[in-house]
Image (cartoon, rainbow, N blue to C red):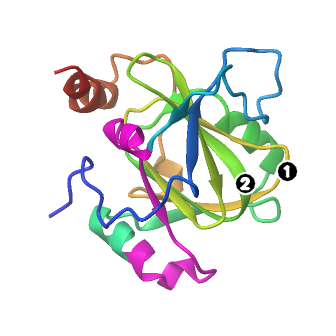
């Protein structure tokens, strides 16, 4: 039986100092690869991310295919397909990275694992505010189906990562927001946003 997306498939051992998250400012003039902190800074806890359905793990080792935590997470949810995000392995890497920064959602969960480099995952909270999550080597993040999100490199301009999904890359659907009528979006809002307001 598949594990509920509201519950981590294994224990979350990522510490606050390993994964940092904060609310972003709304400035369109700042480079989107910068941290984009509010003034004063508004940090977001891992507990808040979990309330939004965003789960994080610390996974170390280059042999991620055989790393036990990775195998457990993938097998529990059926993530049998993967895509490498790397300048030398992804065609049109620069173009794809720009596309990743467009706000979008998927009708299925997505796991990303950072092998090398750094970057940012941005997710919208229940009030449509952007939360920026800084990722680096060894960090794995699960984004639930239906959450608005985007991704960018930071000013280091380098990332080697792998995306895991339960469907082949050719069937990996992406919907640019807003798309509130999409079934996956409705299910997400019901499961997470409304639960926080009860």
The x and y percentages for residue 163 are: 55, 58
- Residue beneath disc 1: 156
Q: What is the quadrant of the C terminus in the image?
A: top left
Q: What is the quadrant of the N terminus in the image?
A: bottom left
Answer yes or no: is residue 84 visible.
no
Mark 1 packing: few (<14 Cα in 10 Å), some, or many (20+)? Answer: few
Q: Is residue 35 left or right of residue 178?
A: right
The x and y percentages for residue 142 are: 43, 51
- Residue beneath disc 2: 118
At a point 81% along the width and 59% down the height, the residue shown is 87
Q: Determine the image quadrant of residue 150.
A: top right
The x and y percentages for residue 112 are: 54, 56
* Label pair 2/1, CB-CB below 8 angstroms: yes
The local secondary structure at tag 2 comes to strand
The local secondary structure at tag 1 comes to loop
Start-end of magenta stretch: 46-71
């Amino acid at each position: 039986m598949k594990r509920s997306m509201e519950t981590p498939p294994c224990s979350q051992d990522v510490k606050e100092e390993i994964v940092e998250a904060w609310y972003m400012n709304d400035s369109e003039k700042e480079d989107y690869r910068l941290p984009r902190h509010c003034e004063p800074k508004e940090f977001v806890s891992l507990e808040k991310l979990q309330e939004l359905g965003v789960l994080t793990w610390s996974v170390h080792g280059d042999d991620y295919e055989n790393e036990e935590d990775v195998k457990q997470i993938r097998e529990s949810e059926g993530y049998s397909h993967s895509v490498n995000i790397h300048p030398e392995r992804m065609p049109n890497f620069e173009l794809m990275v720009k596309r990743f920064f467009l706000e979008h959602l998927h009708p299925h969960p997505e796991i990303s694992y950072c092998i090398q480099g750094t970057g940012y995952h941005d997710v919208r909270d229940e009030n449509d505010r952007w939360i920026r999550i800084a990722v680096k080597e060894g960090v794995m993040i699960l984004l639930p189906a239906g959450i608005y999100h985007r991704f960018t490199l930071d000013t280091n301009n380098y990332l080697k990562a792998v995306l895991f999904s339960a469907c082949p890359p050719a069937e990996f659907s992406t919907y640019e927001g807003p798309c509130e009528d999409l079934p996956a979006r409705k299910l997400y809002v019901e499961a997470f946003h409304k639960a926080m307001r009860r």
